[in-house]
Amino acid sequence: MTRVVVLLSGRGSNFRAIAEAGLPIEIAAVISNRPQAAGLAWARERGIPATALDHTEYADRAVFDARLADEIERHRPDLVVLAGYMRILSAAFIARFEGRLLNIHPSLLPMFPGLKTHERALAEGVKVHGCTVHFVTADLDHGPIVIQAAVPVRADDTPETLAARVLAQEHRIYPQAVRWFAEGRLAIRDGRVNLQDDSTSQSVLVPEG
Ligand code: GRF
C-alpha cells in the first residue's frame, strides 16, 4: 500500500474525494496548519490520524516548515498530497519531498498561477478554464503536469459558479493522479511527466463529462 500524508488548510473536499475513491493507498495522516480546518474534523471522525500544526506559533517559515517536514516523515509517506494547503512551501521543504509531492491548482497551468484564478480567468475572458495536478518543484505552480481537466466558461459565470464547475473536475482528476502514482505509472523525464502503460490514452486532458 502506498502511504500518503495529506496537507490541507480548510474545507478538505479534495482530501475527501481522494479518501473515498477506493484507491490502493493508506492515508497515514492528515496535517493542517489551521487547527479549525474542516478537513481535520472529517479525518478524525473516520479515525484517520489528524494533526494541527499552527504556523502562527512558529517564528518564521523556515522553522515551521522544518517542523512540518519532521511531522510528515514520522509517518513514512511514499507520497505527500497538498489538498488546499494555503501556504507557500520553502525550498528546503520541497527539496526533502521532491518527486513525491503533488498539488492541485485551480487553473489550466501555466495559465493563472497564484491566487484568485477564477476571477482572473473571467477578467481575461478565456473560454476554457480548468484545473491541474502537478508535481511540486521550487518553481511555484510550474512543476511537471500529471493531469488536467477543462471546463467551458459561460457568459453568465461568476467566480463562484466557475469555481464550482472546476471543483467537480478537481474531485475527478486528483484521485486519478494519486492512483497513477500508487500504481508506479508516473515517470518524470526532462521535467515532464510520462504516463507509463497508457493504453487508454485519456491521460492528459479529461474533458468535462
Ligand atoms: C481547491 O480549489 C484547490 O484547487 C486549491 O484550493 C482549493 C481547496 O479546496 N488548491 P478543498 O479544501 O480541497 O475543498
Image (spheres, grey):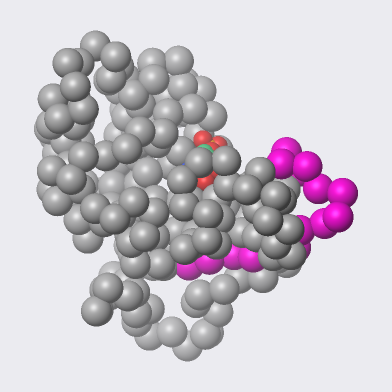
Q: Quadrant of the N terminus?
A: bottom left
The magenta segment is: 147-161
Q: Nearer the viewer, residue 70 or 19?
A: 70
Q: As drawn, is 36 to the left or to the right of 140? A: right
> Residue furthest toward the right?
156
Say which residue appears at 19% left-offset and 31% top-offset.
65
In this rendering, the answer to whether 125 lies above or below 42 is below
Q: Residue 126, position in %: x, y?
A: 70, 62
Question: Residue 161's quadrant in the figure?
Answer: top right
The answer to whether residue 206 is seen in the rendering is yes
Q: Residue 197, position in %: x, y?
A: 38, 85
Q: As drawn, is 78 to the left or to the right of 86? A: left
- Residue 102 lies in the magenta-colored region: no
In this rendering, the answer to whether 184 lies above or below 12 is below
Say which residue appears at 71% left-offset and 41% top-offset.
159
Q: Quadrant of the C terminus?
A: bottom right
Say which residue appears at 48% left-offset and 67% top-offset.
147
Q: As drawn, is 113 to the left or to the right of 191? A: right
> Residue furthest toward the bottom?
199
Say which residue appears at 51% left-offset and 75% top-offset.
204
The answer to whether residue 45 is seen in the rendering is no
Q: Nearer the viewer, residue 20 or 181?
A: 181
Q: Nearer the viewer, residue 67 or 30?
A: 67
Q: As drawn, is 178 to the left or to the right of 10? A: left
- Residue 156 lies in the magenta-colored region: yes
Question: Residue 189's quadrant in the figure?
Answer: bottom left
